Image (tube, rainbow, N blue to C red):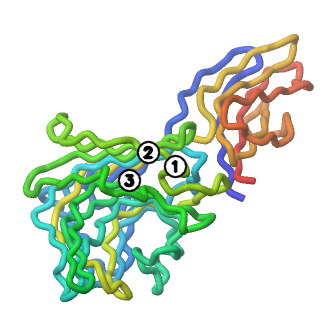
Amino acid sequence: MKKYCLLALASVFVLHSHPLSAATYAARFGSDPTADGWQIAGNTNLFQWDSTNHDLAVTWDSTQTNTYFYHPLEFAVTANDDFSVEFDVMLSDIVSGNEPGKTGPMPIGFEFVNLAAVTDPTFIRNNFGFVPNIAGFDYYTDGYFTFGDQTFPADAATVPSFISGTDSFDYAPQTVSVFDNRLPVNQMVHVLFAYTATNQTAVVLVTTNGVPLVSLPPLVLNGPNGFADPTYNFSMDTFCVASFGSYGDDFNSVLAHGTITNLVVNIPPPAQNLAGMFTNGVWQVTFTDHLDWDYKLQRTTNFVSWQDASVFVDGNGTNLVLTDGVAPPIGAYYRVSAQRP
């Protein structure tokens, strides 16, 4: 089980306020990103750190195998966790139809994924119904599909994408057209993708020099948007910039070149807004919790050993109160330990 401890929250006699930082994975590219835990799986020639320009030069090429510039997460995020990514990207060129007969657009991906799944040699990104546990931002350039004597255009789109891990036939959005938007080439744009667990909503903001380029609607994970099963969930343990191969995909392709900088992934801790106080002589800690986590209170008087001050309590998605009914007579310090059930 993955445990996540929020350290030194309070003293019995003096409340010490320690702001809890989110788990942040940043790649500013002023130095080699591999020194900060970033890795490449697949064809390393597709991702090249430029030490002079302080950016990451990327080739998205569907003729090559699936390739990822990625960072493992401290804990897997689910539908009950907030998570976000933002970055600056400048595309110098992007086309679909670079492979004969594959005229549909394949995405360039900025996604939270299950690493073992996407690095499996049989993984095909557009394999409908067999690609679970994905959430993130995808960009599709213009393309088209031909069936018989009819041609159907596929407009460029900047899309927040989700695929359930419970049933990968549950995906969002089912209607991509509301996210139709063409990213400019040879112009730096800033992209923010953010998912909020409390309202199960994702937003994508695209700006240049702080000015919005487009107004995109929020995406709510509900029945009309493709998540009809109320028990759906997903679990992703890695963030990646993805170049997807088209092997096994007879319809879609992409070839693009560009640069990325100021890449920041944020995952808030599973407990936030902590406060401690005495109530009727009993020490208690309150905090904002998340569903799909279990919490217990622990105490120490020496910061060497910790004792359980409560049993594990299920998160309810709002606020929890943990109490220590047998606090020692001398000063004690507390922490909240969180783990996946």
Q: Residue furthest right?
A: 326
Q: Total of numbered circles in the picture?
A: 3
Q: Are marks 3 and 2 in contact (CB under 8 Å)?
A: yes
Q: Say if 181 sits above or below 279 in the image.
A: below
Counting residues from the start of the chain, the first of labels 3 and 2 encountered is: 3
Seen in the image, is 12 located left or right of residue 175?
right
Quadrant containing the N terminus in the rendered view: bottom right
Residue 266 image offset from top left, x and y in percent: 44, 45
| Alpha-carbon span between mark 2 and mark 1 | 8 Å
Seen in the image, is 178 located left or right of residue 81?
left
How crowded pointer 2 is (Cα within 10 Å; few <14, some 14-19, many 20+) is rated as many
Instruction: Give the secondary structure at mark 3.
Output: strand
Q: Nearer the viewer, mark 2 or mark 1?
A: 1
Which residue corresponds to mark 2? 202
Tell me which corner region of the image, top left, top right, bottom left or bottom right, holds residue 91. Answer: bottom left
Residue 32 image offset from top left, x and y in percent: 28, 61
Name the residue at 73% across, 40% down: 315
Tell me, for residue 160, which label it has, or none: 3
Seen in the image, is 243 located left or right of residue 1?
left
Q: Say if 2 sits above or below 201 in the image.
A: below
Which residue corresponds to mark 1? 221
Seen in the image, is 276 located left or right of residue 240?
right
Name the residue at 28% across, 84% down: 64
Callout 1, which amino acid? Leu
| Alpha-carbon span between mark 1 and mark 3 | 11 Å
Counting residues from the start of the chain, the first of labels 1 and 3 encountered is: 3
Counting residues from the start of the chain, the first of labels 2 and 1 encountered is: 2
Callout 3, which amino acid? Pro
Q: Are marks 2 and 1 in contact (CB under 8 Å)?
A: yes
Instruction: Give the secondary structure at mark 2.
Output: strand
Q: Nearer the viewer, residue 188 or 160?
A: 160
